[in-house]
Amino acid sequence: KGYPKDKTVYEDFADESFYLFLEKHSFFLDVPHYHDSIEILYVIKGSTTVHINGTSHSLSEGEMFICNSQLVHFYENYEDDKLALIAVLSAKYLRTFREVYKHANFPTVLKNVQANTEIYKILDKWYHLKRRNVLIDCSFANLLLDKIVELYGVIPPSEEDENNVLAIKFINYVNENFNKNITLDSTAKHFGYSKEYFSKKFKQVVDKNFLTFVNSIRVQKAIEMLDNPNNKLSFLDI
C-alpha cells in the first residue's frame, strides 16, 4: 500500500532481525520489490502469475513459489477468487540453512502438488499457532526449510549466485549508509577494491552505476519519510 507503481521498492523492514510475515491473503503485492529475506507463497485457491528477475511463472492451486534473497519480484492480481499463504523469513531464520549450504538457493517454482502438500502442512500448523516466540518460530523455520530441501534439494552456487551475493553486500551497504557522505572511492576502499574495479563490478552485479543507485535510494527514502509526518528529512543528503 502506498508503493510507487513505477519504482522497484526495497522492503528494508522485511530485513529486520527475526522479521516474520506469515499470513493468508487474497491480494499479492503487485509492485516490484526485493528484500534479503526469502519469500514463500503457497496457492491455496485460484491462480496467479509471479514475475521474478524478468521471467514469469504461472501458479495454480497447490503450487508454490520461493523467492530467494534480493531478487526483484511481484505478482499479478487478475483473479479475484484466490487465496495464498505467504511467508517472509528474515536472514536470522536462515542461519542454520546457510551454515550447511553456504550460498546455495532454493528452487523458484515448485510444481509437485503432492510434495507441496507436505510443505503446506508445516506452514499451516505454524500459521495456526496461538502462541509463538522466537524459539518456536526458529524451530518451525528449520522444519520448513529442511522439508523443502528434502523434497526438492537446493540449487548449487554458480557465478551468477556469487554475483548475487556481491550485489546483496553492495545494496545493503548503501541502504545502511545512504544518509552519510559515501562516495565511489570510500565504498571501494570499504570492500577492498580499487575504485576502477569496484565501479565496473558494481555496475555488473547491480545493473546501475554507483552514483545513480545511491541517489535512487536517497530519493526513495525521502519519499517514504515524506509520507510519514513524524519523521524529518534534515539528515538526508540528497
Image (cartoon, helix red, strand yellow):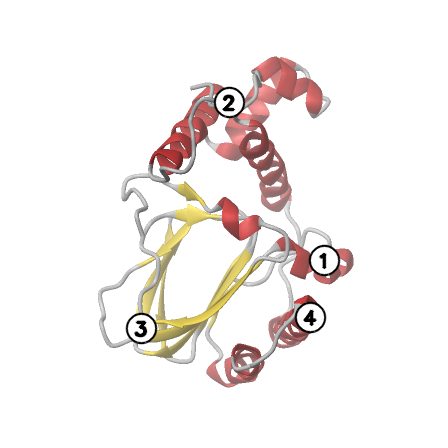
Residue shown at the point (49%, 79%) measured from the top left: 112
Q: Amino acid at mark 3?
A: Ser
Residue 163 is situated, as x and y percent measured from the top left of the image, at 60, 39
Q: Identify the residue under disc 3.
A: 47
Q: Secondary structure at mark 3?
A: strand
Instruction: Classify mark 2: residues with Cα within 10 Å, few (<14), some (14-19) or many (20+).
Output: many
Q: CA distance from mark 2 to mark 4?
A: 37 Å
Location of mark 4 (residue): 142
The outermost residue toward the front is 230
The residue that disc 1 covers is 95
Q: Is residue 10 visible?
A: yes
The type of residue carrying mark 4 is Asn
Residue named by callout 2: 210
**Measured Cα–Cα span from mark 1 to mark 3:** 32 Å
Query: With 214 as the anchor, is 177 left or right in this view?
Result: right
Q: Earlier in the sequence, mark 2 or mark 4?
A: 4
Taking the spot 39% from the left edge, 33% from the top edge, the residue there is 220
Instruction: Give the CA separation, mark 1 to mark 2.
Output: 30 Å
Mark 4 surroundings within 10 Å by alpha-carbon count, few (fewer than 14), some (14 through 19), many (20 or more): some
Left or right? Give the position of 23 relative to 59.
right
Q: Nearer the viewer, residue 171 or 4?
A: 4
Q: Quadrant of residue 238?
A: top left
Residue under the point 46% across and 74% down: 111
Q: Mark 2 belongs to which amino acid? A: Phe
Position of residue 17 measured from the top left corner of the image (x, y, whole percent): 63, 52
Disc 3 or 2, which lies upstream in sequence?
A: 3
Q: Kindly identify which numbered label has been placed on residue 43.
A: none
